[in-house]
Image (spheres, rainbow, N blue to C red):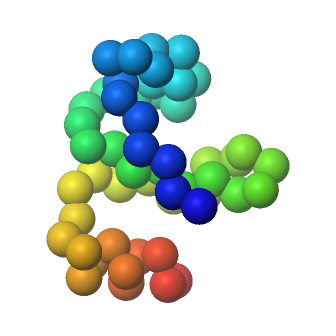
Amino acid sequence: MGVKLDGDLAKDLVSRFHVEGYPTMIVLDSSGKEIKRFGYRSSTEMLGILKR
């Protein structure tokens, strides 16, 4: 499931996940552990990253 957040409104999550720039995409496992992080990617690149 994907969630889009506004970093100006979700400052607690920006701090928790140490977001330093936008856009930042973070993939979490079911326990909330970060497994992948990246910045802007095209839709084709995004699909390739998420399929791995």
Residue closest to the far right: 31
- The answer to whether residue 15 is seen in the rendering is no
Q: Is residue 28 above or below residue 42?
A: above
Vertical order, 15 against 46 (above or below): above
In the image, 35: left or right of 49? right
- Which residue occupies the foreground of this view, 1 or 23? 1
Which x, y percent locates residue 3?
Answer: 50, 48
Q: Residue at coordinates 39% horizontally, 17% vertically from top-left? A: 9
The residue at 19%/71% (across/down) is: 42
User: Looking at the image, which residue is at 32% across and 17% down?
Assistant: 8
Left or right of residue 34: residue 43: left
Compared across the picture, whether 36 is left or right of 39 comes to right
Rendered view: 42 above or below 8: below
Tell me the quadrant of the picture where the N terminus can be found. bottom right
Counting from the top left corner in percent of width and height, residue 45 is at 27, 78
Residue 24: image location, x then y, percent: 33, 44
Name the one closer to the observer, 3 or 19. Answer: 3
Residue 44: quadrant of the picture: bottom left
Q: Position of residue 32 (x, y in %)?
A: 72, 45
